[in-house]
Image: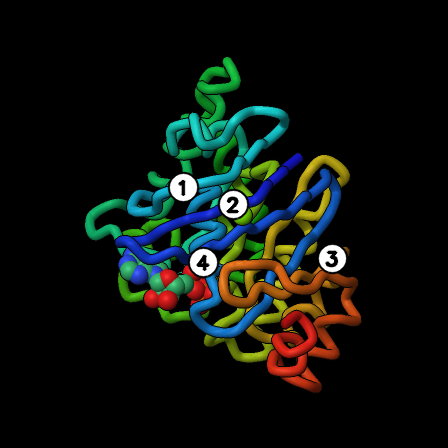
Amino acid sequence: MLEVNDLHVTVEGNEILKGLTLTINAGEVHAIMGPNGAGKSTLSAVIAGKDGYEVTQGTIHYDGRNVLEMEIEDRARAGLLLGFQYPVEIPGVKNIYLLKAALNAQRAAQGQGEIPAPEFMKLIKEKIAYMQMDASFLQRAVNEGFSGGEKKRNEILQMLVLQPRLAMLDEIDSGLDIDAMRVVAEGVNSLRDDNRAILLVTHYQRLLDYVVPDCVHVLVDGRIVKSGNAELARELEANGYEGIEESAA
Ligand code: ADP
Ligand code: MG
Ligand code: MG
C-alpha cells in the first residue's frame, strides 16, 4: 500500500530525513518509535503533504501512485489521512459540520452524493458512543476548550467517521490518562482491517500493549536503524534508544 524509498527531506535547509525506506502492506499496523527530533513527525507530515518540507531525494508511492505529485486534498480523498499531533482549534466551526463536510468531500471524490442526514446522524451517534464522548461535543466548535484527552478522542472520532485507508496517528497517546488511552486504543483497534493500514508514531511502548503492532521501526537521526515485531518495542522500553544507536552505528 505504501512504499517509501530512500527518502531525503529538508526543513529550512536542514536535512531531517536521510534515506528512509519503509514498506507498509494493507492490513498491517506499523509503529514508528525513536528519540525526540529523530524525524518521526516529519515522516508522517511529508506523507500527508503538509507544507514546508522539501523532498530532495527518494520516492513515496501509495497504491502505486506517486504521492509526491498529489495535492494534499487528493491524498486525503485517496484515503491517506493524518490525525493531528496537536489538534487544531477552529473557532466558530462546529465539530459536526467539519465531520460532515470532510465525509461529503470524500464521498464526492468517490463519485457518491452527499450522505443523507438521517444516515449521517446514525453514523455519528454510533461513533461518539464508541469513543465514550458526550453528544454535546458535536455542537461545540472544533476542539475549542477541549481537554488534551478530548482532543485525542475527537481525532479518533474523525478517523472512525472517515475510515481512511492509511491512517497515520502521531503521538495519539501523549498526555492521556490510562482510561482515556484505553478508549483511544480501542478506537484505533476498531480501525484494523484487511484493507487498511495504520501508522502509529509513538514515544512510549504503553500504547503498543493495547494496539499490538505487526512491525516496529526505530527511527534515529533520519533513518530507520532497526525493525522488528512488537517485542522490539518492549526491548526499547527496557533499554532505551542508546543501545540501538550504538548497535546501528
Ligand atoms: P520527532 O517527531 O521525531 O520528535 P520531528 O520530525 O518533529 O521529530 O523533527 C525532526 C527535526 O526537524 C527536529 O530537529 C526539528 O527541530 C526539525 N524540524 C521539524 N519541523 C521543523 C520546522 N518546521 N522548522 C524547522 N525545523 C523543524
Ligand atoms: Mg540516500
Ligand atoms: Mg514528533
Above or below: residue 225 compared with residue 22? below
Instruction: Name which of mark 3 and mark 1 comes first in the sequence.
Output: 1
The location of residue 188, given as percent across then percent down, is 63, 55
Give, as a three-letter code, the residue at label 2.
Leu
What residue appears at the point 72 percent right and 35 percent down from the top-left corner? Answer: 195
Q: Is the residue indicated by label 4 positioned so its CB lies within 8 Å of ligand 3?
A: yes
Instruction: Name which of mark 1 and mark 2 comes first in the sequence.
Output: 2
Between marks 4 and 3, how big is the CA–CA gap?
A: 18 Å
Residue 129, image quadrant: bottom right
Q: Which residue bears the numbered disc 4?
A: 41
Q: Are marks 1 and 2 in contact (CB under 8 Å)?
A: yes
Q: Which disc, if any, is residue 55?
A: 1
Q: In the drawing, does residue 125 fall left or right of residue 31?
A: left
Between marks 2 and 4, how big is the CA–CA gap?
A: 14 Å
What residue appears at the point 64 percent right and 47 percent down from the top-left corner? Answer: 22
What residue appears at the point 56 percent right and 51 percent down from the top-left corner? Answer: 20
Give, as a three-letter code, the residue at label 1.
Val
Instruction: Name which of mark 2 and mark 4 comes first in the sequence.
Output: 2
Residue depth check, mark 2 versus mark 4: number of the one nearer the observer = 2
Between marks 3 and 1, how big is the CA–CA gap?
A: 25 Å
- Image quadrant occupied by the C terminus: bottom right
Residue 102, image quadrant: top left
Residue 108 in view here: yes
Give, as a three-letter code, the residue at label 4.
Ser
